Amino acid sequence: MKKLNYFNSIIFAKVITLFVCAMVVPSVGYACDFNDEDGLDVALVLSGGGAKASTQIGALQVLEEMEVPIHCIIGTSMGAVVGAFYSAGYSADEIGDIFTENNWGRLFAGIVQRNEKSYVEKNREADYLSGNIAGISEQGAQLLGGINSMQRLKGLYRHLLRDVPIDAHFDQLNIPFRAVATDLQSGEAKVFERGDLVESILASMAVPGIFAPRKINDRLYIDGGVSSTLPIRTAKAMGADIIIALDVSEEPPKPNANISVTQTFDQLVNVIIWQNLQQDLSFLQQGDVHWKPNTVGIKTASYERSAKGIEAGRQYALTQPHQVLQSIINRAAPRNARPLKTIKVDQKPASNKILIRNEGIIKENIIKSRGNIDNVDWLDVEKSKKFRNELMAFGGFEEVDIGKKSNGDIELNLKKDRLGRNLLQLGFNTSSDFKGDSDFSFLARITRKPLSEYGGDFSLSGEFGTNIALNASIYQPIGNDGRFFFQPELYARWDRESLTIGDERIGDFLVRKLGVQLGLGRELGTWGLVAVETEINRIKADDIVTTIENFTSSSSSRIGVGLVFESDTLNRTDWPTSGNLLSLKIARSFDLDATSINTDRYDASFISAFNIANNYGVLFHAQYGEIEHESNAVIVGVDFYQLGGFRQLGQFRNGSIPVTKFGYASIETFKRLSEDGKIFSIPAYVGVIGEVARIAPSDFFNIGQEKDNTITGTLYFGLDTAIGPFFIGASYGDQDFLEVFFKLGKTF
């Protein structure tokens, strides 16, 4: 009788609690509300907190080892991520491995990996323009909804949760689960209980300003911490009798008198979150557990300290009174009492139907052919990833996602860029040798992408500074799979060319070039291309100031044709640690003003990158160039190479060695100084380069025949900034020249 009265009182208390919760939280299913005659239902509530959630994992390890039964899990933000993994069947140790083995800095940056981009996009990276920062339309400029993309996070979560159908009810996971986000229109908490688990946890962790709001069923959602950072009310509404809350929130700091505008905004958000937390904490009752495991000061963005966070959370849990947990074990229903059945995707799809949800304008047959959709084994994770990468490389989509439904059907979701089709990029390059030679360039590009239902793009770009350039280019794939392409380009350039031989300044020249170019070729996947290029141009060079006696302006009209083969698998353009780059070009041009004069050009370049140890990289670079010109009437900046400068014989000034033939080799080793994996950081590097070159100076300058090998050594310090790599260093060589330099932007 006493036991019956006890459970009657529990049921009465539960009814009252559910009634109160119904007044303050959205309606949710009673996933924890089982028959209490076999014991009480326990809810694990996980707060938001970014990297601080690593301490929750350590505490969860202890709960797991003590066999504390968990009947439902509710999480917010990164707590929702931890909860989703645990509900889907991952152990606490396995979730710890997910936190410690992934580079969260790169995941949160959301940048598409270089080896997943089309070859044309790889080439454009060399200009070091920003990512797309705005969309241009008739309504004006549309700015980004967040500074980072969730594409890479989504790819990781989709891989880890691939056995959970995208149309699942979360009660059917190993443990019933709910993710809490914030409705951007109403400001209320949204409790996700069914649908796409990956999208639900992405919405729950969509921090305003960092990530754009997530759109689900025509509603926009942001981080759940804004409305319910520790969703105890949701757990009560689900029917939980006992709460185990792992809370990593922190009280807002006391503001100082000189608080800035941004600090004021941050403080306001933190205060709102803190007030919501206090409301949730008021629903805790006697017998509930409220742990705060972040005892070592893990910060929100400190994912690189996840291992320490896990251990700190574990040690915290081990020091808590275990009689409280033992009391919960004694009163709670056993886990196997839950009348639920775990679901997974059918291993053999019944219909093998592929549903394409395409928000863009690319034709469906192009999409299918591009990724060879009919021959993809969708149960093979790597092949599915390759297919997704092919479409990402093709461009025009903000996200490409592949999910599996509970009946085995495949759903391919192609989300158009929310900035639209007209995309703006900006950039800035500069360099100086601290001896009076410096240059700078402001860069801008507007790209319409995709250009048509067959893909491609049209871009207008400009460079303004020491040099001025305007360029209009079309890149249009052709064929069913879009591998073949044609690329017409119209350009105009006004370049200031400075020539210095040794320490002697020869002069400054203005080289004007107007031309049109057409490329016809084929992409070889994302790693290379072969192409035929034709070009017609008009070139004129005038001296601004020069020491050359009787110098006269020179001009030429030319038509040329060339063959190009390029292969590029480098993982990045500045400090690569894997991959190779091979470029082979041969071209012949004909002078239209003097039909008997031809110019032949041969260029070959090879770069190989290695990662030899933790944070150490090695680069090997070899290059050969030769220009055969049938006349001594050469044009400055066109008919000879201009070596000299960082990563091109650093002991000499930029462009100070005019040559018609050269061979060059270098080996570079560098070390990353800053810890990898940080979210908000500027990676720093130190490096050393050894260079050797054999050169044949241009006869135009009459400075002798072929030289012996020239050797140079360089030391530098570098920063990987948001607008391109920054270098400052010094070079010294066998010519007894010492060159100090800094550069921001393009180097190779």
Image (spheres, rainbow, N blue to C red):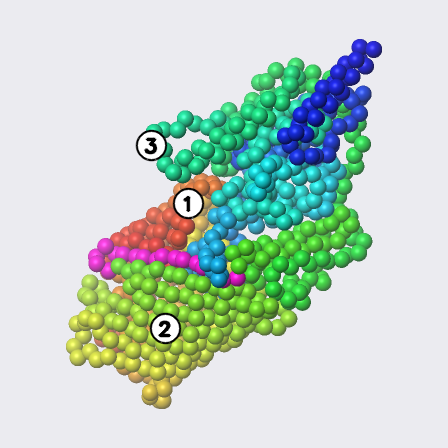
Tell me if mark 1 has few (under 14), some (14-19) or many (20+) residues whose alpha carbon lies within 10 angstroms of its own: some
Nearer the observer, 568 or 280: 280
The residue beneath circle 2 is: 492
Q: Position of residue 223 (x, y in %)?
A: 56, 39
- Residue occupying image coordinates x 64% and y 64%: 367
| Amino acid type, residue under disc 1 in the picture | Pro
Q: Depth-wise, is mark 3 or mark 2 nearer the camera?
A: 3
Q: Nearer the viewer, residue 607 or 292?
A: 292
Q: CA distance from mark 3 to mark 1?
A: 30 Å
Which numbered tag is attached to residue 209?
A: none
The numbered dot on residue 683 is 1
Q: Which residue appears at 30% of the width and 62% of the height?
A: 465
Q: Which residues are magenta?
A: 421-437
Look at the numbered discs 3 and 1 and tell me whether their residues touch, using CB distance below 8 Å. Answer: no
Residue 37, relative to residue 591: is it above or below? above
Query: How many numbered tags mark residues here?
Result: 3
Q: Quadrant of residue 649?
A: bottom left
Secondary structure under the numbered disc 2 in the rendered image: strand
Residue drawn at the location 75% of the way across and 28% of the way down? 33
Q: Examine the rendered structure and indicate whether residue 678 appears above or below residue 481.
A: above
Are the residues at dot 3 and dot 2 in contact (C-beta closer than 8 Å)? no
Q: Which mark is residue 258?
A: 3
Please determine whether, in this image, residue 595 is positioned above or below residue 121. Answer: below
Identify which residue is drawn at 51% across, 28% down: 274
| Secondary structure under the numbered disc 3 in the rendered image | loop
- Left or right for 557, reference 150: left
How many neighbours does mark 3 have within 10 angstroms: few (below 14), some (14-19), or many (20 or more)?
Answer: few
